[in-house]
Image (cartoon, rainbow, N blue to C red):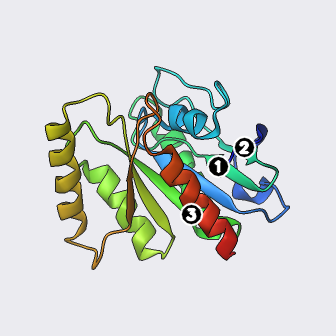
C-alpha cells in the first residue's frame, strides 16, 4: 500500500462523538512511552502527524487520522501511566474500553509492546481483554533497534509463552522499528488485506 495522504481529523473523549462516516478504523494502543506516536509517523511517512513526547501520558483523547481518504488510524491514550490522578486513569480506562467494545467501525487493534523489556502483566492483561471480547488484534513489538537482538528475541519468546497460557493460538505479531522502518510494509500490507476483505 502506498500512503498518499494522512491528516489529523478530530480528537474526542468518547466513542460516541467519533466520525460517523463508517470508514474502517485501526486502533493503536500500548503502555505509555511504548513508541506509539513514532510508529504512527513512521507508518504514514508524515513527520509530526502524531505528537511525540518524552513525557508519558501525552495522548489523552481518541485521535483520528484519515489515511488515503479511505481508513483511519486511531491513536488511543497509553495505559499504565502512574503519574496521573486515579480519577483521570479511571476516565481513560472507561473511554478506551467503551471504544474497544462499542465502536462498530473498529476492525483491528494494534497492541504495541516494548521489545526491550520482559513481558509486563499489564500488557498481557490487555491482550487477554481483547481476546476474551473477540476484538481482532495484532501484536506489534516496538523499538527492536534499541537493544541487542538476543535480548529482543528472549523477551518476544517469553511474551509468546506467557500468552499461550491463556490462548490456543497466537495472534499476528510484527516486529517494528520507527527509526529504521522495519515492519512498515508488513503493517501496511495487513491493513490493505483487511480493507479488501470488508
- Element class at badge 3: strand
Residue 172 lies in what quarter of the image? bottom left
In this rendering, the count of numbered labels is 3
- Circle 1 SS class: strand
> For the point 23% across and 30% down, which residue is it?
147
Residue 84 drawn above or below residue 24: above
Picture coordinates of residue 34, whole percent (x, y)? 41, 36
Q: Which residue is mark 2?
A: 65
Q: Which residue is mark 1?
A: 74
Which quadrant is home to the C terminus? bottom right
In this orientation, does residue 38 appear? yes
- The local crowd at label 2, few if under 14, some if 14 to 19, many if 20 or more residues have their Cα within 10 Å, is many
Report the residue at 62% width, 27% height from top: 51
Query: Left or right: 196 with respect to 121?
Result: right
Kindly report the distance in space between the C-alpha atoms of the residues bearing marks 2 and 1. 6 Å
* Mark earlier in primary sequence (2, 3): 2
Assess whether mark 1 and mark 3 are in contact (beta carbons under 8 angstroms): no
Q: Residue at x 63, y 32 (%)?
A: 50
Q: 55 and 191: which one is in front?
A: 191
For the residues labelled 2 and 1, say whether their Cβ atoms are less than 8 Å apart.
Answer: yes
> Residue, x 43% and y 36% (percent of image)?
32
- Identify residue for label 3: 108
The secondary element bearing badge 2 is classed as: strand
Q: Which of 116 and 188 lies nearest the eye of the viewer?
A: 188
In this rendering, position of residue 159 left or right of residue 86: left
| Mark 2 or mark 1, earlier in chain | 2
Amino acid at each position: 500500500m502506498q500512503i498518499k495522504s494522512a491528516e489529523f481529523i478530530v480528537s474526542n473523549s468518547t466513542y460516541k462523538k467519533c466520525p460517523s462516516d463508517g470508514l474502517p478504523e485501526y486502533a493503536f494502543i500500548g503502555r505509555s512511552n511504548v513508541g506509539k506516536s513514532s510508529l504512527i509517523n513512521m507508518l504514514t511517512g508524515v513527520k509530526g502527524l502524531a505528537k511525540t513526547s518524552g513525557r508519558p501520558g501525552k495522548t489523552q483523547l481518541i485521535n483520528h487520522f484519515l489515511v488515503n481518504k479511505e481508513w483511519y488510524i486511531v491513536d488511543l491514550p497509553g495505559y499504565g501511566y502512574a503519574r496521573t490522578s486515579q480519577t483521570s486513569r479511571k476516565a481513560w480506562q472507561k473511554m478506551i474500553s467503551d471504544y474497544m467494545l462499542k465502536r462498530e467501525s473498529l476492525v483491528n487493534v494494534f497492541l504495541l509492546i516494548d521489545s526491550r523489556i520482559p513481558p509486563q502483566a499489564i500488557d498481557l492483561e490487555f491482550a487477554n481483554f481483547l481476546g476474551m471480547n473477540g476484538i481482532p488484534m495484532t501484536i506489534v513489538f516496538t523499538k527492536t533497534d534499541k537493544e541487542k537482538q538476543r535480548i529482543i528475541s528472549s523477551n518476544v519468546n517469553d511474551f509468546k509463552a506467557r500468552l499461550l497460557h491463556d490462548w490456543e493460538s497466537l495472534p499476528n505479531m510484527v516486529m517494528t522499528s520507527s527509526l529504521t522502518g522495519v515492519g512498515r510494509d508488513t503493517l501496511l500490507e495487513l491493513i490493505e488485506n483487511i480493507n479488501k476483505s470488508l
